[in-house]
Amino acid sequence: MRRPHSIKRSKGFWENKDNRRQFFLELAKELGFDPMVPENWRKVSDAQILAKKVKLSHCTYLLERLANFLMPSQAGRLLTQFKGLFNALQQTFPDLVFEGIPYS
């Protein structure tokens, strides 16, 4: 059985800086802080990132539900691919200085 095209496209989802940026901006909005202040990211835990559902904007409602069923750990893949929140943030927001900020 052939998988829908939109799910196949999500394989490199986190390689796209715009996808990471959208995810982090939405997460910061939901948690109520300014994402452009590096110190604000200190309090964000891996659990909060893992709990955030990834929105695949190119999916219809049914395909998005199917994608969430087949790939429930998209946010976990972000942390794994970039070896943690700190590295993902640095590569997503290169103009911000994250050095010396301990993360929870």
Image (tube, grey):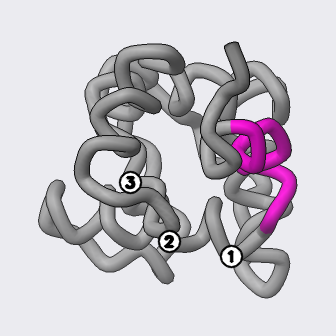
Q: Give whichever of discs 2 and 3 has the lower sequence position.
A: 2
Q: Mark 2 is on which residue type?
A: Gln
Whether residue 73 is visible here, answered yes or no, is yes
The circle drawn on residue 22 is 2
Q: Mark 1 points at which residue?
A: 18
The circle drawn on residue 94 is none
Q: Mark 1 is on which residue type?
A: Asp
Q: The magenta stretch spans which residues?
A: 8-16
On screen, residue 46 versus residue 28, left or right, reads right
Q: Do the residues labelled 1 and 2 touch (CB within 8 Å)?
A: yes
Q: How far is the residue under mark 1 from the one under mark 2? A: 6 Å
Q: Mark 3 points at which residue?
A: 55
Name the residue at 79% across, 60% down. Answer: 90
Could you tell me what secondary structure mostly forms the magenta stretch? helix
Location of residue 53 with respect to 84 vertically, above or below: below
Q: How far is the residue under mark 1 from the one under mark 3? A: 13 Å
